[in-house]
Image (cartoon, rainbow, N blue to C red):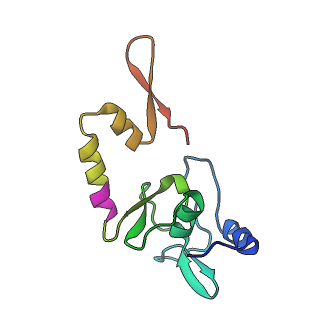
């Protein structure tokens, strides 16, 4: 995928409802039941893949697809903090189960999956705090 021109970049960002760093960022050009798409050179490309490419040093390989770790449907979240690259054919439910299984028994990993950091308090326990972006 080629880089966006400055004009395309402005148009791309005009379709993103950019909110807080931990919130979902709805793609404003989504239609019911369709994936977020962006037109470049009269060709529709995945807005998820494009957003991922904009925020990572290397483009997504062709054998990888982009999932939203927030699991958002309908409005098409494109927050780069919510996007992950996985092997083609991976479904969200299977990915989430794999992450939970890997984190089982590790309270810090489970808190991170839920979007929180554990912060030590004087009593010797931990409290939840939102993860830093």
Q: Position of residue 38 (x, y in %)?
A: 59, 77
Q: Position of residue 23 (x, y in %)?
A: 55, 50
Residue in the foreground of this view, choosing between 5 and 107: 5
Residue 24 figure quarter = bottom right
Up the image or down, 108 lies above or below 2; here it is above
Q: Position of residue 114 (x, y in %)?
A: 40, 42
Q: Furthest-bottom residue in view?
A: 42
Residue 79 figure quarter = bottom right
Number of marks present in the image shown: 0
Q: Is residue 24 left or right of residue 95?
A: right
Q: Is residue 67 left or right of residue 102?
A: right
Residue 67 figure quarter = bottom left
Q: Is residue 36 left or right of residue 4?
A: left
Q: Furthest-right residue in view?
A: 7
Q: Furthest-front residue in view?
A: 58
Judge whether residue 75 can be spotted in this image: no
Up the image or down, 130 lies above or below 79; here it is above
- Looking at the rendered image, the quarter that the C terminus falls into is top right
Judge whether residue 82 can be spotted in this image: yes
Residue 50 is one of the magenta-drawn residues: no
- Which residue appears at 54% of the width and 78% of the height? 45
- Which residue appears at 56% of the width and 74% of the height? 30
Up the image or down, 34 lies above or below 98; here it is below
- Which residue appears at 43% of the width and 69% of the height? 61
- Looking at the rendered image, the quarter that the N terminus falls into is bottom right
- Please, what is the dominant secondary structure of the magenta stretch? helix
Q: Position of residue 101 (x, y in %)?
A: 23, 46
Look at the image and give the residue range highlighted in magenta.
91-95
């Amino acid at each position: 995928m080629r880089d966006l021109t400055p004009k395309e970049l402005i148009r791309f960002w005009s379709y993103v409802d950019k909110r807080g760093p931990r919130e979902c960022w709805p793609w404003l050009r989504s239609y019911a039941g369709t994936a977020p798409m962006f037109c470049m050179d009269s060709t529709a490309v995945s807005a998820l893949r494009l957003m991922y490419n904009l925020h990572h040093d290397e483009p997504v390989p062709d054998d990888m697809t982009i999932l939203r770790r927030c699991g958002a449907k309908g409005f098409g979240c494109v927050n780069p903090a919510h996007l992950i690259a996985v092997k083609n054919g991976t479904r969200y439910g299977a990915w989430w189960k794999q992450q939970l299984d890997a984190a089982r028994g590790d309270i810090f990993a489970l808190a991170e999956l839920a979007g929180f950091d554990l912060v030590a308090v004087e009593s010797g326990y931990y409290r939840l705090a939102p993860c830093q972006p």
